Each structure stands twice: as C-alpha cells, then as structure tokens.
Amino acid sequence: MLTQNKTLQKISTIEHKQLTDILLTLPVPQKRYLKAALNTAVFWVFSLAAFCILWFISSLLVASFSTLDIGISSQYATFIFPTAIVLAAIFAINSTRKWLAESDNLYTLVKADLKAQQVCKASFKVMGVKCFKEPEHGGVLYCLLLQTNSVTGSSDTQCKANMIRVIYDYQSQQAKIDPTTLLKPSDNITIITAPQSLLVLDNIFEGERLADIKHFALTLPPEKWPKPDSWLDEDWQELENSYSA
C-alpha cells in the first residue's frame, strides 16, 4: 500500500542528535562479525559435545543388544568422530548465517540515515483511541485508529485506509510523573521516522485534544504486548477482548 501522506524532509538538529546517540550504542560491523565468529565456535563445541553424548549412549544401547562395538575405542570411531566434527561445524555455520540474515545490521542503516540527512514525515487523522494501563507499574500504551489517504492499484484510484498504531507512554510509569511530559492524543498525529533504519524519532500530536478516550486495564502478559511504535493487524472492535480480557 502506498500512502500519499508521506514526505521526506531535511533532518533537524534534534533528530540528528537522536540518531547519533543511537549509533553510539550499536556494535560496529566488525564487532558484529566477531560476535558471529564467537557464536559459531560456541555452537560448534556444544553441538559436538551433544553428538558425543548421544554417540556414547547409542554405543551402550547397541552393546547391550548385540556384540557390535561402535564406541570411541572401536574401529568405527575413525569414521564416526570426523563425521561428527564436520556435521557440528555445518550446523554451527548455518545457525550463525541464519542469525546474521535475520538480525538487522542497524549500525549500517543508521549511518545511511545520517548520511542522507533526511527523515520521513507521515501525517494521519486519529479516528479513535484506546488506552491500556498496566496495573503494577502504571505504564500506559495507546492504540490509535489512524486514517490515511492511500493509493491502491492504478495511480488514480484512492481510498481511505484505517490502521492501528501502538504508542507507549514511557513517562507514565515513572515514580514521579510530570503531567506536562505525558502523551496528549489529539485528532492528528505526525510520525517521524528515519527512512533506512525505520527508527521512530518522534510522534507529534496536533489539532484538537481528544476527550473520548476509552481506558482499559492491561491484563495481557508482557511477553505478548505489541512492540512500541508498531502497526497492529487486529480488529479494532476486539482490542479490549485481546488486551484486557
């Protein structure tokens, strides 16, 4: 889906500092590959050890039912052990390659954002807000029903698309809350992101403050909470049943 409410603009000083601070916390590519190498070595050692344990147990079972000896001192060991080393190495390398493929090299992406000196600005109309409060620490997450003009199919076909956005109010769980720092949902929101890394740099509410905000207790286990600044592929009418059952 292509949205017509997204524009690129020059990065501000504050946004540049945000990305620079984030970059300082990220491992450089060399350290990432060093970690990958260490992970490969660890996987190789543990998988080889696991194979040797299974080999030992198997040799005992085979010896208890027959006269065949496949233990470490048998003639078969000259074939079994080298094979185990190779299989363990293949498993370790494939595991590391999968980790490298699935884990974003965020350092490189943030560097690209800083080099481009641009941010993406997307504006949406807020159609509804549902607030879920975590009972123990008082943290609040907002689910926003957002509307945007979209283009689907041919370039002259436009439609209104509704999407659900999750935003965490981190200030709400502080011991001493400053009311001026809390999120104040309004009828329009502008989301500013870094185009390459897709990091959200700011959520700016504008327009008229929304008074009709529905509040619910957040009873869903933390491991099932949606990620902050993410889109939800769920039914708006069923959110309270999913998060506050």
Image (spheres, rainbow, N blue to C red):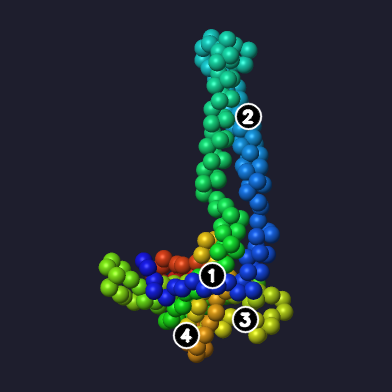
Q: Is residue 92 above or below residue 100?
A: above
Which residue occupies 45% across, 81% down?
Answer: 126
Q: Which residue is mark 3?
A: 182
The quadrant the N terminus occupies is bottom left
Which residue occupies 55% across, 53% down?
Answer: 104
Q: Which residue is mark 1?
A: 119
Q: Which amino acid type is marked by label 2?
A: Ala
Q: Dot 4 lies on which element?
A: strand
Image coords of residue 168 (percent x, y): 57, 72
Q: CA distance from mark 4 to mark 3?
A: 16 Å
Q: Which residue is mark 2?
A: 49
Q: Which residue is mark 4?
A: 187
Q: Is residue 7 above or below residue 187?
A: above
**Upstream in sequence: badge 3 or badge 2:** 2
Q: Nearer the viewer, mark 1 or mark 3?
A: 1
Q: Dot 2 lies on which element?
A: helix
Image coords of residue 34 (percent x, y): 66, 42
Tag of residue 215 = none
* Front-lying residue, 50 or 33: 33
Q: CA distance from mark 4 to mark 1?
A: 23 Å
Q: Which amino acid type is marked by label 3?
A: Leu
